[in-house]
C-alpha cells in the first residue's frame, strides 16, 4: 500500500525525477514556482466516484465468496470489522477528524480483501486521487 502523503511530501515526491508513480497518481504539474499538486475540479471529483463505486462493488462482491472458501484470512476480515466499527464510533461521537481518518481506512481494508493485485492497484489510484481533492 502506498503511504498517504501530506501536501508537502506530495509536492516533494512530484519534484523527484524518479517519482514517476507519484507524478501520475497525484497529477503533479509544473508551476512558475516549481511543482504543485493539482487539485481536482468539481466535475473530476464527480467522475472519480463512478469508477470507485464500480471497483469497490467488485471487491465487495468477491469478498464473501472468497472468505467462505477460506481464501481470505480471518485476520483480514477482523481488520475490516474493526475499521467499520471505528467509522461507526467516529460518526456516533460526531468526531469529524476521526471519521475522516477512519472512512478511508475502512475502504482500503475492504478493497484489499479479495487479494487481487490489479484491483487493489486500481483502487489505490482512485483513492489517492480522491485524497488530493480533499
Image: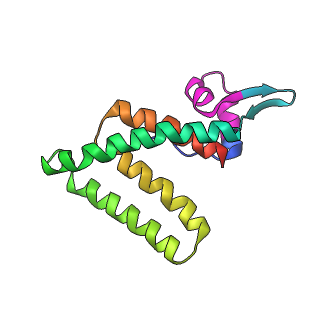
Can residue 2 be seen at all in this image of the molecule?
Answer: no
Is residue 44 visible in the rendered structure shown here? yes
The location of residue 119, given as percent across then percent down, is 37, 34
Q: Of 97 and 9, which appears nearest the observer?
A: 97
Taking the spot 25% from the left edge, 57% from the top edge, the residue there is: 75
Residue at 45% in and 38% down: 123
Query: Where in the figure is residue 22, as x and y percent of width and height?
Result: 59, 31
- Measured along the vertical axis of the image, is residue 22 above or below residue 54? above
Left or right: 133 as drawn, with respect to 85: right
Q: In the image, what residue occupies the spot 72% across and 35% down?
A: 38
Q: Position of residue 40 (x, y in %)?
A: 68, 38
- Report the coloring of the rendering: rainbow
Residue located farthest toward the right when viewing the structure as drawn: 32
**Most frequent secondary structure within the magenta stretch:** helix
Q: Residue furthest left?
A: 69
Left or right of 5? Residue 110 is left
Q: Is residue 131 above or below residue 100?
A: above
Q: Position of residue 27 (x, y in %)?
A: 65, 30
Q: Is residue 94 above or below residue 49?
A: below
Q: Is residue 27 magenta?
A: yes
Residue at the image point whose x is 21% and y is 51% from the top = 73
| Magenta segment boundaries in residue numbering | 10-28
Amino acid at each position: 500500500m502506498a503511504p498517504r502523503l501530506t501536501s508537502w511530501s506530495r509536492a516533494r515526491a512530484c519534484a523527484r525525477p524518479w517519482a514517476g508513480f507519484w507524478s501520475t497518481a497525484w497529477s503533479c504539474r509544473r508551476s512558475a514556482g516549481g511543482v504543485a499538486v493539482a487539485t481536482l475540479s468539481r466535475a473530476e471529483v464527480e467522475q472519480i466516484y463512478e469508477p470507485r463505486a464500480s471497483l469497490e462493488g467488485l471487491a465487495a462482491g468477491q469478498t464473501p465468496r472468497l472468505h467462505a472458501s477460506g481464501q481470505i484470512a480471518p485476520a483480514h476480515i477482523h481488520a475490516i470489522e474493526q475499521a467499520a466499527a471505528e467509522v461507526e464510533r467516529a460518526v456516533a461521537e460526531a468526531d469529524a477528524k476521526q471519521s475522516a481518518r477512519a472512512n478511508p481506512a475502512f475502504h482500503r481494508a475492504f478493497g484489499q480483501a479479495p487479494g487481487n493485485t490489479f484491483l487493489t492497484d486500481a483502487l489505490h489510484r482512485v483513492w489517492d486521487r480522491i485524497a488530493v481533492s480533499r
